[in-house]
Amino acid sequence: AIQLTQSPSSLSASLGARVTITCRASQGISGFLAWYQQKPGSPPKLLIYDASKLEAGVPSRFSGSGSGTDFTLTISSLQPEDFATYYCQHFHSYPYTFGQGTKLEIK
Amino acid sequence: QVQLVQSGAEVKKPGSSVRVSCEASGDTFRSYTITWVRQAPGQGLEYMGRIIPIIDATNYAPKFQGRLTITADESTNTAYMDLSGLGSEDTAVYYCARSRPTAIDHWGQGTLVTVSS
């Protein structure tokens, strides 16, 4: 099975900061990667699909890039509601595994 | 509006089985895949398996092969996740979700399954 490794595992940042989270796949997955945001007590929310496509209704400060094995999620200017845990997931081959998550906290 | 409504919390004994249901609204069953994901307390997301209701095809993550069964009843737009041989490590919130080919775009509210003697 393809493994996804996110870095960092946790991150502290200030309001207005630019933040980048990385997701690395154990083998090439083309562009078949999605990013989710999860807040405590709630299910995940889709942010980005196909590595760089913004899901409808998601603020434009979120962006994704990458292809092959290396991917990034960038938040251009952190807002209070962005402090959460972020997960990547691939859709290249079965099973569609998740990264271990990156917890974003307020500095 | 897409809605996925799951059954309520369960408490199970070790070695027993659990069934979680997921009722979907709209055209979910005709056009999408239903995926099951779980999350142990304080842990990350774990992919379990999926069903494509329109062709009744299933796939299971290797870790769950042999004790996970996912089914769908198109007449009631309801999917079911049956997990057998429960152990304490199966204590988790179980989510059903609607999937497109390369994303999970809508999630149920989650069902807490607690395995305890």
Image (tube, grey):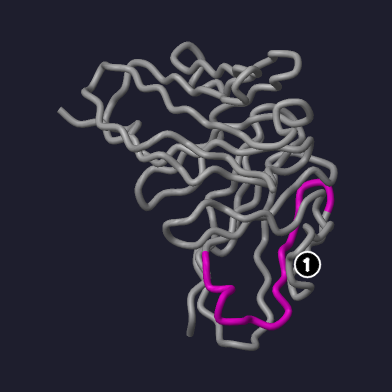
Nearer to me, A100 or B14: B14
Q: Which residue does the image show at 79% across and 35% down from the upper left?
A: B101
Which residue corresponds to mark 1? A63
Nearer to me, B31 or A81: B31
Check the image and report above or below for A81 versus B64.
below
Check the image and report above or below for B51 versus B22.
above
Q: Amino acid at mark 1?
A: Ser
Residue A50, image x and y in percent? 82, 49
Q: Residues within 10 Å of mark 1 (few under 14, many from 20)?
A: many
Q: Which residue does the image show at 64% across and 88% down from the upper left?
A: A16
Q: Which residue does the image show at 60% across and 44% down from the upper left?
A: A98
Check the image and report above or below for B84 versus B26.
above
Check the image and report above or below for A69 versus B65.
below
How many numbered circles are shown? 1
Asked if the magenta segment contains residue A81, the reply would be yes
| Mark 1: secondary structure | strand
Magenta residues (range): A67-84
Q: Which residue does the image show at 73% across and 43% down from the upper left?
A: B103
Asked if the magenta segment contains residue B3, the reply would be no
Residue B92 appears left or right of A65: left
User: What is the chain identity of the residue bearing mark 1?
Assistant: A
Residue B102 appears left or right of B53: right
Nearer to me, A82 or A32: A82
Picture quadrant where residue B58 is located: top right
